[in-house]
Image (tube, rainbow, N blue to C red):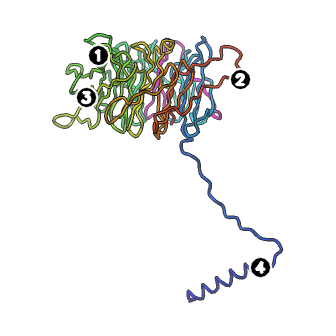
Amino acid sequence: MISTYKKLGLLFVTTLSVALMAGCNDNLRQFIVPVPKPTGDPGAFSHAVVLATNPVAGANGITMHIDVSGDSNAGQVNTGPNPVFLGKAGSRVFVINGDNTITSYIALSPTASAVNTVTQPGGVSGTIAGGTSSSGNFYATNSGTNDLSQISGFALAVTQTIPVGTNPVAIAGSAANSKIYVVNNGSNNVTVVSTTDNSVLKSIPVGSHPIWGVMADNGVQVFIVNQGDGTAANPGSVSVIDTNLDIVIPCSGTGCSATTRAISLGFTPASSSPNFAFYDGKRQRLYVSNTGDSPSSISVIKADGINLGVTPQIVPSLLANIHVAAPPTSVVALSDGSKAYAALGGCPAGTNHTNLLSRLGSCTGNQVSVIDANALVEITPPISVGAGAVSIDAAADASRVYAVSAQAGNVAIIRPSSNSVSMTLAPATDSSCISNCAHVPFTVRVFP
């Protein structure tokens, strides 16, 4: 057996021989050691997608992609005519157009991926909103024909239409659940649809004139925003559905109705007219924007620890009504749970995603409210942005907030670290466009 010392000696001799051989050559031999290069900012793989419409009848809309890490326009995609809704399913963008077609493409490859147009079956009308579930398919509500279209995420075609309630206007679903919950504004109920086989499982009565729905990140609860009818008997409220039992969960505390199990919202519930809600997964609470409340407000629903299997039951309740500077149109919470931001568009009371485009001319508000999630108060003063602040969303890493100003025609990029606008971006004009080229941004969603 060769000893360790002999092994080291042989290694030294071999190394010395190589060095001497290299020295006998007139050319210097260089050894190249590869140095790993940075792989890039992970934020580069996130886009804030802004949907803009052209108010001219029949004119195509666009989506503008903002690179989250670079704060730059990463590309634009032409949609169908007069788009009304921006949705997502998995990695894909789905834009519902005014002619009931649906534009779809890979979200993070706006300039490279194929843009597909999905055509609805003849007779379908009033396509207004959409959503997804664990199936990966996209579902679109057809408010004019009281049904739902399933769009295959693989084939990118309508594979089935499903009858639901009257005037379906929204869908609550997520990748954590194999069911979707269809909000029926005209029949004051929610249709539960299995996305495994598209069967209708149940119809659940909720509050008056439901307008929006959102599912908790874990898929266990669904929150239905009831806009109400402007009376004390049917105020603006939230109904919370348990997705295991498919029942409206009892509530407790201020504003809770023992009869309807709905939680009234705002300082003046009869006229609060809520329109939108955002679920904060970090704190397990719901932020709701009230378009008609006096004074203007954001309501917060406490939803952490809900448990119907204990005595007494742990049920949702109203945590706070937060006074904000002007009527809000939408709201978002940062992923770290520290703050929430509300777009104060100042739109007429009752404005929601179904009628927003017809009311943009009246949305003159130019502020974004910052809400301290610990103290549940508005941090003053609000942030000034362009006129018509109607939509808002936040980056997944809580580094940026995006506020769309429809009248100003731009998007303000807000830094939560300083609560200030770092820059604004506007959709680029298509160089091939000759007339009617103005696009009005009105919705933003961050992908993935």
- Residue indicated by mark 2: 431
Residue located 22% across and 34% down the image: 314
How many discs mark residues in the rendered view?
4
Left or right of 314 on screen, residue 383:
right
Specify the amino acid type for callout 2: Ser
Q: For numbered disc 2, what is the local secondary structure?
A: loop
Name the quarter where the N terminus is drawn.
Answer: bottom right
Mark 1–mark 2 distance (CA, rounded to whole Å): 49 Å
Left or right of 422 on screen, residue 283:
left
- How many other residues sit within 10 Å of disc 3, few (<14), some (14-19) or many (≥20)? many
Instruction: Give the x, y percent position of residue 134.
Output: 43, 35
Q: Of marks 1 and 2, which one's residue comes earlier in the chain?
A: 1
Instruction: Give the x, y percent position of residue 392.
Output: 47, 27
Determine whether label 3 and label 2 are within 8 Å by CB: no
Q: Of marks 1 and 4, which one's residue comes earlier in the chain?
A: 4
Q: Of marks 3 and 1, which one's residue comes earlier in the chain?
A: 1
Which of the two marks, 1 or 2, is nearer to us in this view? 1
Q: Nearer the viewer, residue 180 or 301?
A: 301
Q: For numbered disc 3, what is the local secondary structure?
A: strand
Residue located 61% across and 27% down the image: 116
Left or right of 341 on screen, residue 406:
right
- How many other residues sit within 10 Å of disc 1, few (<14), some (14-19) or many (≥20)? many
Mark 1–mark 4 distance (CA, rounded to whole Å): 91 Å
Residue 268 is tagged as 1
